[in-house]
Every structure is written in C-alpha cells, then in structure tokens.
Image: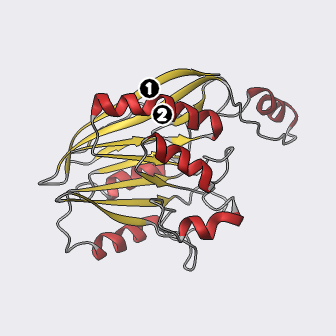
C-alpha cells in the first residue's frame, strides 16, 4: 500500500503547482491515498471552501492542518464541522470545531490519519501532543489497522524527532510539517516507522519559505515587521514523500522524498 503526503501547500502558487504536478504523479506512482497539509492554503493563512475544492479536484484525498487552521474564522465552523475530508490538530483545546483524526476505509484496508501540533516555540498553549497520541491509539486499539499516518506540525526539529521515537513501532509514518523546507533525514526506524523531520512545501521557490523575499530581508535588516506577500507566479517547488506500507503489519517498507519544480504563469 502506498501513501503520498504533500508538504504545506502555500497560497495560490502552491495550489497551482499541485494542480499541475499531482495528476501526472498519481498516474506514475499510483498511491492508494494522497494527503496534504493545507494550513497555508488560502494566501498563506488558513483554508476556504473554494481553495480546498481546488486541491481536492487536483487529486488530494485528505487534508491536515496546523497553527493556521482557523485563521479564516468566518468559514471555520462550516469547513471543520462539515463532511469535508479535513483534519485540524487533535491536541487543540476541547470545543474547537472539527476532528484531529479519522479512520479512512479503502476497500478492506483501514488507515488511521492523525494530525498533531507541537508546542515548542509555538505561540499558543496546545495540549500535549504526546499524551494525545496515546489517547488516540488507545481509542483505535481494537481496529485492525493497515496503516497509521501522523502529521506532526511543529516548529522545533527536536520535538518532531522525539515524536518519531515516541511513536516508533506504533505508527507507520511520522511526518513533520510547518518549516516549509524538506529535511534530508528521511528513513525507516528499527521498528518499522517511516519518518522525516519536515516534508517541505508546495509553493514559491524564489522567496523565503514561500514568501516574497524582499520584505523578509527588510524585516531582518530593520526589525520592523513587513507584510508577508506570497507570489502568485514564477518558479514553484513541490515537496512530498511516498511511503510504502505493508498492510498486514502496518510497518513501513520505504519512504521516498519527491522534489519537483514547475513554472507557474
């Protein structure tokens, strides 16, 4: 069984890159499930129904989130409490719209998709992602799961690496998101968990983390915060990982990084 996971899709240029690259990639790789982090989908912050529809139409099956999941307050209730295949981090406080995990059925296979958010260097006081993972795994212990996929959306590399050790042998894959830069540490742990500290992003390849570079440089030079502008055209990068999993054991067999570039006009 194969799962394709796409890093943070950032703005219109990221959505267009996904729409341009993903259909052909699916024909080539034939994944059983395509998941993407979408917390930066709508101009870098949050999601809207229309932007979600774009990436679902391009071939994304399920979406995960992070610290910007609720940046678009007006549509949050409708999006997260509706029937859309989207998660927000499970360790948000009680009472937040939506859900943080889902049991996805693909024929006779069951995939548990879990979305968590880290706490180190993040601006909000989220519940503990480690304890929340224990709770979720206990809730689904009776299920005959073919795979368990975790998106840990976190700032600190140490926290994401710690999560991969904490979930070692209990999850098929622990995939870090948030930094927008793909790390070079992908691999399979001794107990069969695929891991990577950060999957990267789908977005502008010519700025800083998907944002236009000039205002970022001015902010560093002056310590005055300038608006983050996301280019809509130009060179785009598409980062993803393809995980191959044995559905009988839910252990990962391989993890392959995917890096593609395209020109968005």
From the top left corner, tell me how far across and down residue 61 is, in percent.
40, 50
Q: Nearer the viewer, mark 2 or mark 1?
A: 1
Q: Nearer the viewer, residue 79 or 3?
A: 79
Measure the alpha-carbon separation of dots 2 and 1: 9 Å
Is 155 placed left or right of 164 in the picture?
A: right
Residue under numbered circle 1: 259
Query: Are the residues at dot 2 and dot 1 in contact (C-beta closer than 8 Å)?
Result: yes
Q: Name the N-terminal-most of marks 2 and 1.
A: 2
- Give the crowd class for mark 2: few <14, some 14-19, many >=20 residues within 10 Å: many
Question: Residue, x 51% and y 52% (percent of image)?
Answer: 153
From the top left corner, tell me how far across and down residue 249 is, in percent.
13, 54
Q: Which of 39 and 255 is in front in this view?
A: 39
- Give the crowd class for mark 1: few <14, some 14-19, many >=20 residues within 10 Å: some
Quick one: SS at disc 1?
strand
Quarter of the image where the N terminus is located: top left
Question: Residue, x 47% and y 53% (percent of image)?
Answer: 63
Residue under numbered circle 2: 182
Q: Tell me: residue 191, above or below residue 83.
A: above
Quick one: SS at disc 2?
loop
Quarter of the image where the C terminus is located: top right
From the top left corner, tell me how far across and down residue 181 is, in percent.
53, 34
Q: Tell me: residue 133, above or below residue 248.
A: below
Q: Is residue 125 visible?
A: no
Q: Tell me: residue 159, above or below residue 129.
A: above
Question: Residue, x 60% and y 48% (percent of image)?
Answer: 51
Question: Residue, x 36% and y 50% (percent of image)?
Answer: 174
Colour treatment of the image: secondary structure
Q: Can residue 32 be seen in this view?
A: yes
From the top left corner, tell me how far across and down residue 14 is, in percent.
58, 35
Image-quadrant location for residue 97: bottom right
């Amino acid at each position: 069984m194969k799962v394709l996971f796409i890093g943070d899709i950032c703005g219109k240029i990221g959505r267009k890159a996904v729409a341009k690259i993903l259909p052909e990639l699916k024909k080539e790789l034939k994944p059983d499930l395509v998941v993407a982090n979408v917390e930066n989908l709508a101009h870098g912050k949050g999601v809207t129904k229309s932007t979600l529809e774009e990436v679902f139409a391009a071939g994304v099956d399920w979406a995960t989130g992070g610290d910007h999941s609720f940046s678009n307050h007006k549509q949050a209730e409708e999006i997260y409490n509706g029937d859309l295949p989207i998660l927000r981090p499970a360790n948000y406080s009680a009472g937040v719209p939506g859900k943080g995990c889902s049991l996805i059925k693909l024929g006779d296979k069951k995939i548990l998709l879990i979305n968590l958010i880290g706490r180190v260097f993040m601006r909000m006081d989220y519940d503990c992602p480690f304890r929340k993972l224990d709770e979720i795994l206990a809730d689904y212990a009776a299920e005959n799961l073919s795979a368990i996929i975790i998106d840990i959306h976190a700032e600190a590399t140490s926290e994401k690496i710690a999560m991969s050790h904490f979930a070692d042998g209990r999850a098929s894959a622990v995939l870090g998101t948030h930094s927008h830069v793909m790390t070079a540490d992908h691999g399979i742990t001794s107990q069969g968990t695929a891991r990577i500290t950060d999957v990267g992003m789908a977005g502008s390849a010519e700025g800083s983390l998907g944002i236009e570079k000039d205002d970022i440089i001015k902010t560093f030079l002056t310590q005055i915060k300038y608006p983050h502008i996301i280019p809509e055209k130009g060179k785009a990068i598409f980062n993803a990982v393809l995980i191959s999993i044995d559905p009988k054991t839910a252990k990962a067999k391989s993890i392959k990084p995917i890096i593609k570039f395209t020109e968005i006009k």
